[in-house]
């Protein structure tokens, strides 16, 4: 109980800090968005409208993250839609591909059963999976794999739930890190914010799900997200 009160205090503080910086970050984002819109016809002409689409989507995602932080002291109810887990994972992995390529790690998505549907806030769940994949890439970079870094994603059905496993062969965690990784502002990285997993934890909790982790120092880490599923289409 004490632990929870401490977390809530920190989350309230996080909400206040976010409120003051969100405004400052949103202004340049709005300007960038406007200018990309202006460039869009030119990009279309040279057959690169796809670039504009990706930039706009990423700006919108950044805006969503800001909103997410703003809501940290006052968690919002998820805006749920029913989505196929397979497409949700595919779309999310696609967003990380260029970074993975740069960092020399491979992301393997074991094709889940196309008929598994979940009722979730798609943007929020994508955010959680992105956070975990990005951490996995950092962990792989940390251990210094020579292009042998691998992130494996698979899903499993567990008693009326869907469990998403995200496993990496990065540097793993010691017990101290393991016990604190969901704390707001806890980070072991030089330029980390320590927010990714605390926000992820809250998002999954708001969805009635569970997020858990197994890790071995020097070997790797596995995150598991369990979400209640909606239905199976046959
Ligand atoms: P940040 O990435 O900004 O540090 P997070 O909340 O996402 O914030 O993560 C908190 C900490 O948890 C990280 O600094 C890192 O020490 C640890 N961590 C998270 N994921 C992994 C992973 N896959 N492998 C090793 N350590 C991890």
Image (cartoon, rainbow, N blue to C red):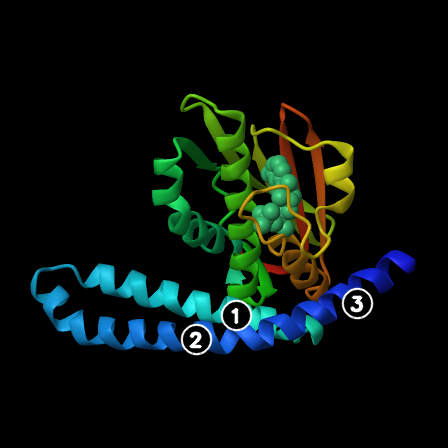
> According to the image, label 1 marks what residue?
66
Q: Residue at x 40, y 24 (%)?
A: 147
Q: Quadrant of ligand 1?
A: top right
Q: Give the answer, above or below, for where 131 lies relative to 136.
A: below
Q: Horizontal placement of 32 versus 120: left or right?
A: left
* Residue 164 shows in this picture: no
Closer to viewer: mark 1 or mark 3: 3
The numbered mark at residue 169 is none
The location of residue 115, given as percent across then percent down, is 52, 53
The location of residue 4, given as percent across then percent down, is 85, 60
Q: Are marks 1 and 3 in contact (CB under 8 Å)?
A: no
Q: How many marks?
A: 3
* Residue 8 shows in this picture: yes
Provide the secondary structure element on which disc 1 rests. Answer: helix
Q: Are marks 1 and 2 in contact (CB under 8 Å)?
A: yes
Q: Give the answer, above or below, for where 51 lies relative to 145.
A: below
Q: Nearer the viewer, residue 220 or 87?
A: 220
> According to the image, label 2 marks what residue?
26
Whole-Å distance between the Cαs marked 1 and 3?
19 Å
């Amino acid at each position: 109980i004490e632990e929870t009160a401490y977390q809530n205090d920190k989350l309230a503080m996080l909400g206040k800090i976010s409120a003051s910086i969100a405004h400052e970050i949103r202004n340049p984002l709005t300007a960038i968005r406007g200018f990309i819109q202006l460039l869009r016809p030119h990009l279309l002409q040279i057959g690169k409208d796809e670039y504009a689409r990706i930039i706009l989507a990423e700006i919108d995602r950044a805006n969503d993250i800001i909103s997410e932080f703003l809501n940290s002291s006052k968690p919002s109810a998820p805006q749920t839609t029913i989505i196929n887990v397979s497409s949700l994972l595919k779309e999310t992995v696609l967003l990380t591909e260029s970074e993975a390529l740069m960092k020399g790690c491979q992301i393997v998505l074991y094709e889940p059963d196309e008929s598994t549907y979940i009722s979730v806030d798609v943007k929020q769940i994508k955010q959680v999976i992105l956070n975990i994949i990005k951490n996995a890439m950092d962990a792989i970079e940390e251990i210094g794999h020579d292009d042998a870094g691998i992130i494996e994603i698979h899903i499993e059905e567990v008693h009326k739930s869907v469990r998403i496993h995200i496993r990496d062969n990065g540097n793993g965690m010691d017990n101290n890190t393991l016990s604190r990784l969901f704390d707001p502002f806890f980070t072991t990285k030089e330029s980390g914010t320590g927010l990714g997993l605390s926000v992820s934890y809250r998002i999954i909790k708001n969805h009635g799900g569970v997020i858990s982790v197994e890790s071995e120092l020097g070997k790797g880490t596995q995150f598991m997200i369990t979400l209640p599923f909606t239905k199976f289409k046959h």
